[in-house]
Image (cartoon, rainbow, N blue to C red):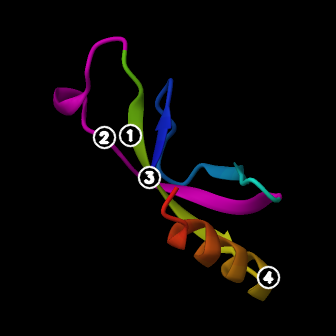
Amino acid sequence: MLHLPRVLRPGTPLEVTLHTVEEQLTVQGTIVWVEPPERRNPGGSIRHGLRFTALDQSFCQALGLLLADPL
């Protein structure tokens, strides 16, 4: 899920960079859903669902480590 300042339509391709302590992870994705207007907070960010579209083995490993980190 991404929080964005404006609505992007489902099907919109994106390149997203995740910043970690050790590196930056850049991945391709596509918007698959958008938070409905009745659930949005005025002036707030808008939730979007992102589906990764091009994952390689090294990205999957780095993402797994990032998600497993308890912060």
Asked if the residue at tag 1 contacts the one at tag 4, i.e. Cβ–Cβ closer than 8 Å, the answer is no
- In terms of sequence position, does the residue under pointer 3 or pointer 1 come before the other? 3
Compared across the picture, whether 29 is left or right of 25 comes to left
Count of numbered badges drawn on the protein: 4
Q: Residues within 10 Å of mark 1 (few under 14, many from 20)?
A: many
Q: Residue furthest top?
A: 43
Residue at mark 4 to residue at mark 1: CA–CA distance? 27 Å
**For residue 25, which quarter of the picture?**
bottom right
Asked if the residue at tag 1 contacts the one at tag 3, i.e. Cβ–Cβ closer than 8 Å, the answer is yes
Taking 27 as reference, is 33 above or below it?
above
Which residue, given by chain and number where applicable, does mark 1 sit on? 47
Marker disc for residue 58: 4
Amino acid residing under circle 1: Arg
Asked if the residue at tag 1 contacts the one at tag 2, i.e. Cβ–Cβ closer than 8 Å, the answer is yes
Disc 2 is placed on an element classified as loop
Residue at mark 2 to residue at mark 1: CA–CA distance? 5 Å
- In terms of sequence position, does the residue under pointer 3 or pointer 4 come before the other? 3
Compared across the picture, whether 23 is left or right of 41 comes to right
Which residue, given by chain and number where applicable, does mark 2 sit on? 35
- In terms of sequence position, does the residue under pointer 2 or pointer 1 come before the other? 2
Which residue, given by chain and number where applicable, does mark 3 sit on? 1
- In terms of sequence position, does the residue under pointer 4 or pointer 2 come before the other? 2
Q: Which residues are magenta?
A: 23-43
Residue 36 lies in the magenta stretch: yes
Q: In this rendering, which labeled residue sits more in front, label 4 or label 1?
A: 4
Disc 3 is placed on an element classified as loop
Q: Residue at x 81, y 59 (%)?
A: 22
Residue 23 position, x and y percent, is: 83, 58
Residue at mark 4 to residue at mark 2: CA–CA distance? 31 Å
